[in-house]
Amino acid sequence: MPEKEPVRVRIAPSPTGFLHLGTIRTALFNYLFAKKEDGVFIIRIEDTDTQRSLPVYEEGILSGLKKLNITWDEGPDVGGPYGPYRQSERTEIYQKYIKQLLDEKKAYWCFCSKEDLEEEKKAMLSQGLFPKYGGTCRRLTPEQVAAKKEAGQNAVIRLMVPTGVTIEFDDMIRGSISVNSDTIGDIVIAKNESAPLYNFAVVVDDELMKITHVIRGEDHISNTPKQMLIAGALGFSRPHYAHLPLILSPDRSKLSKRNLETSFDEYLKDGYLPQAIVNFLGLLGWHPDDDQEIISIEEMIRKFSLRRVQKAGAIFAMDKLDWFNEQYIKTMPLEALIATLDPFVPLHWKENPQRLAAAVNITRERMKKLSEFQELAVLFFERGDYPGSLLSWHDADSKKTKTLLETARGALADIPSDAFVQKNLEEKIMPLADQIGRGDLLWPLRTALSGQKNSPGPFEIMSVLGKDESLGRIDRAIEKCSAGFDR
């Protein structure tokens, strides 16, 4: 039996913008497949667009993937045996293969203007034909080509595509796909001998880097036959192809540009955890045999299979991402959560680390995003103003509300400061609440402590605030009652 070829996969992001979720999902699926198959995962930077490619974007892509725990074996920062790993540093390699095709008469110079091509397209459409390049410049003699180049005419290089040929490949997700070469026409592969276009450069790079599997988005299906034709002309091997489902909105329409192009850093700034994003994206078009939802990247590797990647579009639902984030916030070790929350915590709140830890522990149950912490936890650090009437339960007057708060305060004052914990607070107050009426006593008490209509319960709040601050807030509420709810 022949030895199984080692799996080698790649992603090839363009550093023309910040890392976004679409690129992350493609990187994740390649990474999972490589690790499951004991293969090699490569990052190759497609930076031939010199006007838009910037080092800051490349750095953002690489650092973002590292934050997501998606690491690579070969790439521009770690090197490898098949570098360089930036297309801008591979110009001489491309020149060699473009020259080869020209010398072998498998490619030719095309001098047709944009206006000529547009007229040709219109004529074909009017005849009910599939619009493609008609091959006008195929028939130019070497002397004619030289004359046009000497005259400075603009030109591109086209691959000669055979007519009447069926190009077929077995997609690992979608099954058999075939295209007739007559629908393609002669492909533009380069602007000149030093400026290859995407479809040419990617074929050369995949061959020389020994890529065995190309895993990418469904929007690249139309590129695959073209790349297969280029590879065939060069005598290259053919990788296996797998095209991931498109990412769609909940109504199954094309995902909005806002969601698709929002940078990964923006999600971090909004309080999403990297591990929640990985979990969400991993299940965007794939699911394990047991339909497990909360799944770490290590578990994904063990369970991953391209066989379980769906053909239909994957639904991008923000509420689902929020749910994943919420689950990870709830289960994260407290110390780790406090450290992760650091950018979202006002500086003066950090002066009381004990109260901060207690506030984090309570609010984590209500947080969907880390950015919500400040709003949820402000009541533990700031005495916000509120109308006295908010203290009233079912329109109780200020006199009755004052009496209820004084009753609660008296009971609380008997608890020593070092015993001012939730269990003792409940044991002291709940018998009174059951006797007086739970809403009658607990509503004004909770409101006095939080200053908010909606908040955690009074015992949770007091366990965070401690005795002195809790009694101080109750005293302030009693003053409001004394003023007849005027302030």
Image (spheres, rainbow, N blue to C red):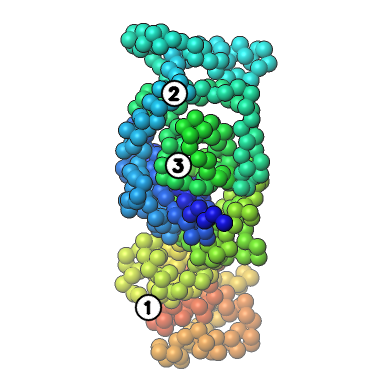
- Residue 443 placed where, x, y %? 57, 74
The quadrant of the rendering that contains the N terminus is bottom right
Determine contact: label 3, label 2, CB under 8 Å: no
Specify whether 451 is left or right of 316. Answer: left
- Residue 177 placed where, x, y %? 65, 38
Specify whether 51 is left or right of 114. Answer: left
For mark 1, does the 10 Å Cα neighbourhood hold few (<14), some (14 to 19), or many (20 or more) residues?
few
For mark 3, does the 10 Å Cα neighbourhood hold few (<14), some (14 to 19), or many (20 or more) residues?
many
Q: Is residue 271 visible?
A: no
The furthest residue to the right: 128
Q: Is residue 430 visible?
A: yes
On residue 206, the disc is 3
* Residue located 40% across and 65% down the image: 341
Front residue of 340/2: it is 2
Q: Distance between the Cα atoms at labels 1 and 3?
A: 55 Å
Q: Identity of the amino acid at label 3? A: Asp
The furthest residue to the front: 1
The numbered mark, 1 or 2, whose residue comes first in the sequence reads: 2
Determine contact: label 1, label 3, CB under 8 Å: no
Instruction: Identify the element where label 3 is drawn.
Output: helix
* Residue located 57% across and 78% down the image: 442
Q: Quadrant of residue 40?
A: bottom left
Q: Is residue 419 above or below residue 101?
A: below
Q: Distance between the Cα atoms at labels 1 and 2?
A: 76 Å
Front residue of 444/399: it is 444
On residue 354, the disc is 1
Q: Is residue 397 above or below residue 73?
A: below
Circle 1 or circle 2, nearest the eye = 2
- Residue 33 placed where, x, y %? 52, 55
Q: Which residue is mark 2?
A: 104
